[in-house]
Image (tube, rainbow, N blue to C red):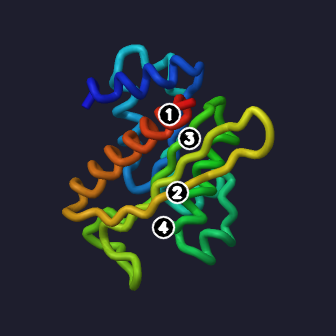
Amino acid sequence: MQASLEPLGNALRGRGWRLATAESCTGGLIAALCTSVAGSSDWFDRGFVTYSNAAKSAQLGVPAPLIEAHGAVSQPVAEAMALGALAHSEAQLALAVTGIAGPGGAVPGKPVGTVWLAWACRQPEGTPEAHSRLLTLPGDRTAVRSATVAAALQAAQQLLQALSRP
């Protein structure tokens, strides 16, 4: 997986950007993978592991009423996590993931494998905007977490490629 991070690191480095992560269901796996690459200090700023709802609020500024209204595994919370990671870092790009990796934790409408992936970019002018995508991933806890990491890094790479197009 380290070789596949080279294009992401090069794209971030080329823009003079840094990445921050806000992770719940992956427990820091995205940050760990990024920092396993030599030279990642050029493009990786920091990672927030916000497994509990209290951590999401304390470290990222996600409003507790938002979590209460929508649940921790929701589009609004994932987007608030991404925006919070930007606000509490020096990064220009933030990735956030929150989901149900299993085997427990499923609730009606949110089965095991439900993951929200969100990203936000710091804008030169104006307020950053977050975007998100719902993932429905098969497999056990390890498979869901691994697929979430891969999807998040792929989303970052695709975003940077889209920003590079004229």
Q: Quick check: 41 left or right of 146?
A: right
92 or 107, which lies in front? 92
Task: Check disc 4: other Cα within 10 Å, few if <14, some if 14-19, many if 20+.
Answer: many
**Closer to the observer: label 2 or label 4?**
2
Q: Earlier in the sequence, mark 3 or mark 4?
A: 4
The dot on residue 132 is 2
Q: Quick check: 76 left or right of 30?
A: right
Which residue position is annotated with label 4? 73
**Closer to the observer: label 3 or label 2?**
2
Is residue 65 something that shows in the picture? Answer: yes
Helix, strand or loop at mark 1:
helix
Please tell me which residue is depicted at 43% across the width and 39% down the height of the picture.
158
**Closer to the observer: label 3 or label 4?**
3
Q: Earlier in the sequence, mark 1 or mark 4?
A: 4
Which residue position is annotated with label 3? 94
Q: Earlier in the sequence, mark 2 or mark 1?
A: 2
Q: Are marks 3 and 2 in contact (CB under 8 Å)?
A: no
Which residue position is annotated with label 1? 160
